[in-house]
Image (tube, grey):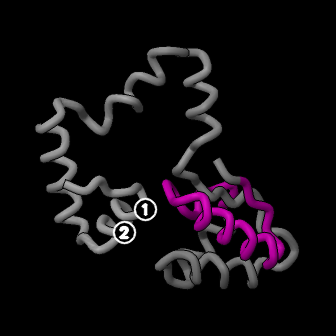
Amino acid sequence: MAKLSTADLLDSFKEMTLLELSEFVKEFEETFGVTAAAPVAAAPAAGAPAAGAEAAAEQDEFDVVLEAAGDKKINVIKEVRALTSLGLKEAKDLVESAPKPILEKVAKDVAEKAKESLEGAGATVTLK
């Protein structure tokens, strides 16, 4: 049997569907008696204090919190409506009752885009 290079293997994996790849990983784990999650689980046990700092640095869910509407409240209300599915009254009430969360548990890129658009409208926003 010819030995496949890493590039050949990656090309083969790229052609697989996610379901096929998932089945391959399960079979690989059973055949060799390993799990894909083992290295991840072992890392926090090795250095518990460092793991806490890494977890904070690698946060993957963010809350977009409106701290203040600023001078251009109408523009901020429009942005809140664009980011959420709120109606005009609900968005207005949310903006007037700041500080309030606008989006909760969203990805970093979504949170940063929301922050930019709200700050562009004149609001003060923080990510938590």
Task: Locate residue 73, reporting x and y percent.
Answer: 77, 77
- Amino acid type assigned to the residue bearing label 2 in the image: Asp
Distance, label 2 to label 1, CA atoms, is 6 Å
Q: Are marks 2 and 1 in contact (CB under 8 Å)?
A: yes
Please report the bounds of the magenta region as a residue range. 97-126
Residue at the (25%, 34%) spot, across then down: 35
Name the image quarter holding residue 120: bottom right
Secondary structure of residue under mark 2: helix
Residue at the (32%, 35%) spot, across then down: 37
Position above or below: 53 against 8? above
Answer left or right for 105 relative to 6.
right
**Which sits in the foreground, 6 or 94?**
6
Name the image quarter holding residue 64: bottom right
Residue at the (47%, 79%) spot, across then down: 85
Residue at the (47%, 22%) spot, across then down: 44
Q: Which residue is mark 2?
A: 11
Q: Which residue is mark 1?
A: 7
**Which sits in the foreground, 65 or 117?**
117
Task: Locate residue 8, reporting x and y percent.
Answer: 36, 64
